[in-house]
Image (spheres, rainbow, N blue to C red):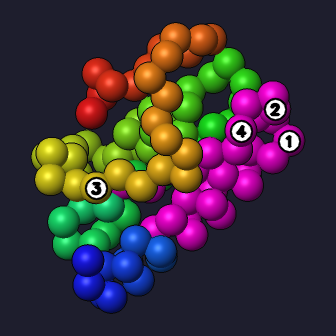
Amino acid sequence: MNNNQLLTDEKFMRRCLQLARNGRQNAKPNPMVGAVIVSPDGRIIGEGYHVRCGEGHAEVNAFASVRPEDEALLHESTIYVSLEPCSHFGKTPPCADLI
């Protein structure tokens, strides 16, 4: 991996961590999680965080924030998430069907 890619990854992961902090008060007992969807040209087209325990996860909220005109970019985009995506059923189902 080249240095430019590392810098890009770090930039978007930092944004994930910023978003995650928005869940500080209400995400408990779940972890604070942020997610950013980046188009192939490097533009953020969606972002979200885990707002409240029992509600949508960061990834789901990021997908929901994508504008209709950017939806065609999703299949080529990269999603950055500050925690590995959930693959289990708890209060909310996994979001694998959205990816």
The image quadrant of residue 7 is bottom left
Badge 4 is on which residue? 31
Q: Residue at point 42% right, 55% down?
A: 80
Marks 4 and 3, how far apart in space? 22 Å
Q: What's the residue type where badge 3 is placed?
A: Thr
Query: Where residue 84 sits in the image (x, y, percent)?
Result: 49, 41
Within 10 angstroms of label 1, few (less than 14), some, or many (20 or more) residues? Answer: few
Query: Where residue 14 sits in the image (x, y, percent)?
Result: 57, 69
For this orientation, the residue located farthest to the front is 1
Q: What's the residue type where badge 2 is placed?
A: Lys
Query: Where residue 27 sits in the image (x, y, percent)?
Result: 76, 34
- Element carrying mark 4: loop
Marks 1 and 4, how far apart in space? 11 Å
Badge 1 is on which residue? 25
Badge 2 is on which residue? 28
Q: CB atoms at circles 2 and 1 under 8 Å apart?
A: yes
Q: What's the residue type where badge 4 is placed?
A: Pro
Badge 3 is on which residue? 78
